[in-house]
């Protein structure tokens, strides 16, 4: 796996800490404290998805995280005016534009960078003008990668949901799709990130995917934290990611 010179980075998504809080309408567990714990456990950044329906993360959570010294914040959000204005005001380090449907349990796929090109491009420009590094959460397809590059987004995040749910020959096909998209993205000068559905069991399959910079992982880390604590769950994931970079295939030329 050829990645950035500093090694594969981990973005810890703390949405589901907020899910647990919202289930009872309490003020705990606090996702901001979870973000602090993750950073102390050597996460590289914290990711949160501020949904329109506010089902877990709230605007106040995002504002508090942005005020945390040394916390690098990646805000996932839909391309809607109120959220774009919020991001322009708050100026997180990164914004990842994602698709969103009220009835979905979790994000079900990548954003349609081809079909929604005309509406996404002005948002990418507006966020970039605010000093925010913009990413598009896309399916690992040639058309989506090319459209992302054309609209001026410096980063893409490859949706790994289909990979995470596949097995056998189907998983091998998904690895191939991710590999091809990563190669194409790198050739076009894009930073290539990946995420969705990743856990300790399926992570090793990504050693065949080159040029990955950041993996954004949330649900499996928060779930694992029930048994070992959040800090240790983050450290376990970091160790698993380090093993990807240490694999013999990491040095192979594609």
Image: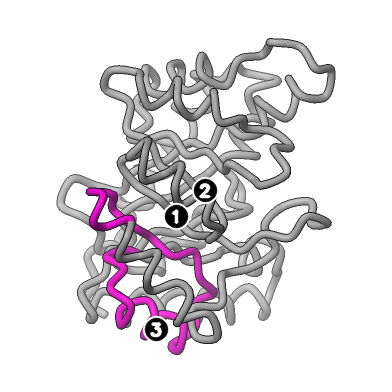
Q: Is residue 33 visible?
A: yes
Categorize mark 2 by other alpha carbons within 10 Å: few (<14), some (14-19), many (20+): some
Which residue has dot 2 on it?
Answer: 83
Q: What is the secondary structure assignment of the residue under circle 1?
A: strand
Q: Is residue 13 above or below residue 79?
A: above
In this view, the residue farthest toward the bottom is 143
Q: Residue at x 62, y 18 (%)?
A: 228
In this view, the residue farthest toward the top is 27
Rendering quarter of residue 11: top left
Which residue has dot 1 on it?
Answer: 96
Q: What is the secondary structure assignment of the residue under circle 2?
A: helix
Categorize mark 3 by other alpha carbons within 10 Å: few (<14), some (14-19), many (20+): some
Rendered location of residue 111, percent (x, y) = 56, 70
Which circle, 3 or 2, is nearer the viewer?
2
- Mark pair 3, 1: CA separation: 15 Å
Which residue has dot 3 on it?
Answer: 147
């Amino acid at each position: 796996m050829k990645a950035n010179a500093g090694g594969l980075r981990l973005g810890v998504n703390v949405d589901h800490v907020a899910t647990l809080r919202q289930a009872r309408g309490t003020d705990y567990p606090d996702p901001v404290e979870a973000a602090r714990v993750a950073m102390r456990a050597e996460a590289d950044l914290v990711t949160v998805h501020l949904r329109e329906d506010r089902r877990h993360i709230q605007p106040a959570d995002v504002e508090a995280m942005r005020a945390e010294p040394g916390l690098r914040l990646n805000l996932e959000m839909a391309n809607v005016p109120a959220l774009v204005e919020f991001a322009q005001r708050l100026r997180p380090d990164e914004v990842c534009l994602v698709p969103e449907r009220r009835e979905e349990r979790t994000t079900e796929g990548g954003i349609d960078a081809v079909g929604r090109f005309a509406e996404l491009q002005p948002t990418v420009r507006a966020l970039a003008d605010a000093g925010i590094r913009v990413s598009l959460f896309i399916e690992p397809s040639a058309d989506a990668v090319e459209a992302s590059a054309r609209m001026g987004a410096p980063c893409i995040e490859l949706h790994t949901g289909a990979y995470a749910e596949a097995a056998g020959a189907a998983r091998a096909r998904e690895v191939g799709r991710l590999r091809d998209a990563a190669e194409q993205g790198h050739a076009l000068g894009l930073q290539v990130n990946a995420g969705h559905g990743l856990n300790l069991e399926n992570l090793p399959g990504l050693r065949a995917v080159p040029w990955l910079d950041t993996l954004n992982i949330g649900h499996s880390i928060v779930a694992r934290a029930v048994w070992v604590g959040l800090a240790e769950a983050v450290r376990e994931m970091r160790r698993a990611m380090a093993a990807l970079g240490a694999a013999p295939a990491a040095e192979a030329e594609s």
